[in-house]
Amino acid sequence: AGVITTTSSTKGANAELEFTVNNSFVKSDSVIQLTGLYNGDGFVSLNVKSVADGSFIVVYANSSGTTLNSTIGVHFIVL
């Protein structure tokens, strides 16, 4: 389990960004659960794109018609 805090995101409407999380507890058959904390304008959605031994890829998307303007807290747990 852990929390990742992004830098202040300024992604435009309907834009996506992905990043890799390295974690030695992750195995290729792990289930990753995500929740997010975002208090700015717009709406952020989080998804796991893929999982491999030692890492997983998170995709966050601005699912709104406005530009994001705050940090995003990505909370995760490895099952």
Image: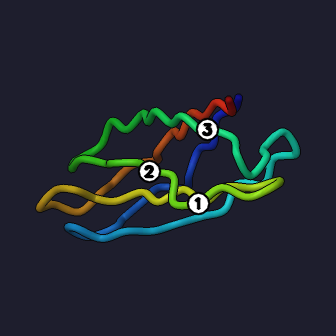
Residue 72 vs 17, above or below: the answer is: above
Residue 68's spot in the image, x, y percent? 29, 57
| Left or right: 74 as drawn, with respect to 63 | right
Q: Nearer the viewer, residue 41 or 30?
A: 30
Q: CA distance from mark 3 to mark 1?
A: 10 Å
**Tag 3: residue type?**
Val
| Left or right: 32 as drawn, with respect to 47 | right
Q: Which residue is mark 2?
A: 47
Q: Which residue is mark 3?
A: 31
Give the structural element (helix, strand or loop) at label 1: strand
Query: Label 3: how many residues lie within 10 Å, few (<14), some (14-19) or many (20+)?
Result: some
Instruction: State which quarter of the image contains the N terminus.
Output: top right
| Left or right: 26 as drawn, with respect to 79 | right
Residue 76 vs 48, above or below: the answer is: above
Q: Earlier in the sequence, mark 3 or mark 2?
A: 3
Q: Nearer the viewer, residue 10 or 77?
A: 77
Q: Which residue is mark 1?
A: 50
Give the residue displayed 59% in from the left and 44% down from the top: 5
**Tag 2: residue type?**
Asn
**Tag 1: residue type?**
Ser
